[in-house]
Image (cartoon, grey):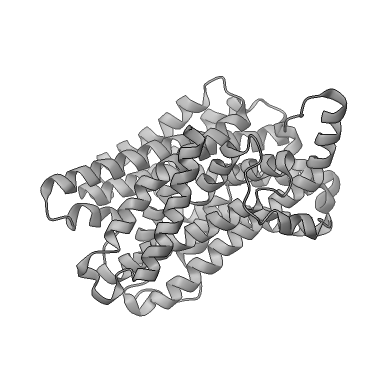
Amino acid sequence: MGKRGKFGPGFLIAAAFIGPGTVTSATIAGATFGFSLVWVILLAVLSAVVLQEMVGRFSLVSGLEIAQALVKIPRKGWVRVLLGLLAFLAIVVGCAAYEAGNIMGGSLGLNIITGIPPRTWALLISLTAFFILLKGNYPFIERFLISIVILMGCSFLVSSLLVRPDLRLLARGMIPRLPTGSLTLVLALLGTTIVPYNLFLHSSSILKKWRDERDLQLMRWDTGLSIGLGGIITIAIIITAATTFYLKFHLLRQFTGTLPSITPGDLSLQLEPLFGGFARLCFGVGLFAAGLSSAITAPYAAAWTARGLFGWPEKSHRFRVVFSGIILSGVVISSFSLHPLSLIIVAQVTNALLLPVVALFIGYLLNQKQLKGYRNTLAMNLLFFLVFTVIILINIRKFV
């Protein structure tokens, strides 16, 4: 049996999605639309729990990571090749975009602390992530950084209580609606909560923690609790942003005719009810830790997925080439003359656009005869289809 315990990979995955993308997307959503997009987080959490549970169930019952399964289960060779290539491209493109957002997010954290421009820090953060992965001391450093991220998340939770939000408006925000101009942020909130590469990483992490279907109940509790907590923290960020910025911004629009936008320096104002004059420093440290931890996780996840798809040993040079390429692509993208917060939002939207491809693979795997009594039931397939359809419709609406 694996190492049994109450908490497992789900909490690492939840901490990973409380990164620069979540903080930025939720802050801009709250500042621009108040509580109107809280329903998106509820949808995203439900979707993440459904997909992560399917991934965990498949891995525990089959003993395979989903990356390995995509090239082992299909009977026809051309199907294996097609699925493998599509999965690899989806993860690599998503990780490259996400990596750029992570690097910029970590750089913004240092910019808030020091005042030195973010792009000055981008190369330093990239090199740090590269050497941590190269030396192999990734797990210990990741846990240290994630502990800081969890503290930042708890700070938002406390701050959201201190600002005393209007509960009636908060409840109204749980009713689905799309305010004019909100689609990009809707996709960003989905993409930052249901990160495609996290599904692959979750699969491999589960097999390191647990062994077989006897651990299914532990896995489900771990997944539901951790992702639910991540969703609560995301809603807390929307609450603090809405109470800090929304009314002020819309009053200014009445006088000026234009809606002000969030600047990187504004982000830390949400923690002032808790930390007062230390809010800037505390937020900067938290955002830096979130950016660096995610900047390590994304290239590692891409390399691990490639290893599963193509059967490489973890110590092979090809494994290193993949994570080095993801870091390099992140540096290149983050060097473009884009507004830092806009770059982070674009990275999350990219993940949301790629999500249906990865979700289809997971739905395919969970309906295989090899799983016997652990295949998706009709009810599970209907829930999966509902989640998948809603995400597809939002993507189509954005394009249209």
Left or right placement of residue 103 versus residue 359 in this view: right
User: Where residue 80 sits: x, y (%)?
Assistant: 18, 48
Above or below residue 112? Residue 314 is: below
User: Where residue 310 sits: x, y (%)?
Assistant: 21, 47
User: Where residue 82 sits: x, y (%)?
Assistant: 21, 43
> Relative to the observer, which residue lies in front, 139 or 290?
290
Residue at horizontal 70%, vertical 55%? 236
> Relative to the observer, which residue lies in front, 333 or 45?
45
Residue at horizontal 45%, vertical 56%? 387
Above or below residue 97? Residue 223 is: below
Residue farthest along the bottom direction in this orientation: 214
- The answer to whether residue 297 is seen in the rendering is no
Q: How many marks?
A: 0
Image quadrant occupied by the N terminus: bottom left
User: Where residue 21 sits: x, y (%)?
Assistant: 57, 42
Left or right placement of residue 214 versus residue 242 in this view: left
Residue at horizontal 81%, vertical 53%? 274
Instruction: Name the quadrant containing residue 56.
Output: bottom left
Above or below residue 146? Residue 341 is: above
- The answer to whether residue 318 is seen in the rendering is yes
Residue at horizontal 39%, vertical 68%? 380
Residue farthest along the top direction in this orientation: 337
